[in-house]
Image (spheres, helix red, strand yellow):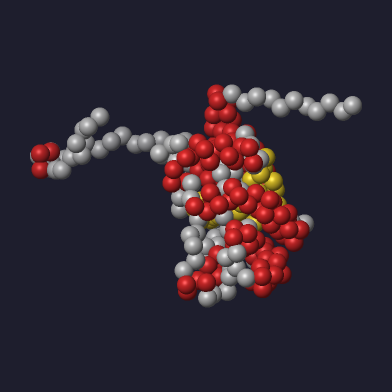
Amino acid sequence: MVKHKEKKELSKKDYEKELEKLQLELVKLQAWIKERQLKVVVLFEGRDAAGKGGVIKRITEPLNPRICKVVALGTPTPKEKAQWYFQRYVSELPTGGEMILFDRSWYNRAGVERVMGFCSEEEYQEFKLSCPEFEELIIRSGIILIKYWFSVSDIEQEKRFQSRLNNPAKSWKLSPMDVESRNKWVEYSKAKDEMFEFSDTDLSPWYVVNADDKDKARLNCISHLLSMIPYKDLTPEPIVLPKRVNQPKDYVRPPMNTQRFVPEVY
């Protein structure tokens, strides 16, 4: 009988320590992306409440928002519905020196649109044909494309839904679409499996993140992301601040009571 290796518990202290290390490496990666004018796209997909937003937040926390940008598109407008399906995503792709994080992406068509009937069968079949070609095209253009699927069990998803339901600060995360997804677990599973069949390619593979443990999922995903882009440490030499210049004696600043201060409630 094969003994499975027991998973090591991760304390909050260890999690924060490891996250700090990884975030420092993300800053180094950011400098490399800017220096080398790389174009990076990272897709985050998965079931509702799988933890995509949490890992995106930890990636962006230490980074310059001018270099690392998050794209989370809403429901398409009537004009966008009449466009080529990929058109509104193309406009969000990076220029040199940028990393774009898609909080859900063009795979909406293979997920929620497919399951909820928001697209026709003809539109879905066209997506199946076009998606691998679209990704091949953008990769060939020089874009680094990395795709993550966050996998969460039905038991853990239900726990997170209940947590959102009972927490006023998180209730906005629970949409009518999320509620409906609870009744379509099998349909979403089938849609995901079919999506992987045509989009998990050698050129553009999916990387699955076990997301039942949020902290481990965040560390594992960030660690993997760092391993996907070879980079060097471009940290500059420490800056030496010059001595402050004294205020000219002939300059008198206006009285503080002429300015509108925020009330110091705390």
In the rendered view, would you say 226 is above or below 98?
above
Near-viewer residue (32 or 67): 67
Could you tell me how many numbered marks the image carries? 0
Near-viewer residue (102 or 100): 102
The residue positioned 87% from the left and 28% from the top of the image is: 2
The percent coordinates of residue 147 (x first, y second) are 65, 53
The percent coordinates of residue 4 (x first, y second) are 80, 28
Image quadrant occupied by the N terminus: top right
The percent coordinates of residue 51 (x first, y second) are 57, 42
The residue positioned 34% from the left and 36% from the top of the image is: 242
Specify whether 240 is left or right of 92: left
Near-viewer residue (58 or 50): 50
Query: Residue reaching furthest right?
Result: 1
Query: Residue reaching furthest bottom?
Result: 82
The residue positioned 25% from the left and 29% from the top of the image is: 266
In the rendered view, would you say 164 is above or below 147?
above
Specify whether 157 is left or right of 196: left
In the rendered view, would you say 214 is above or below 56?
above
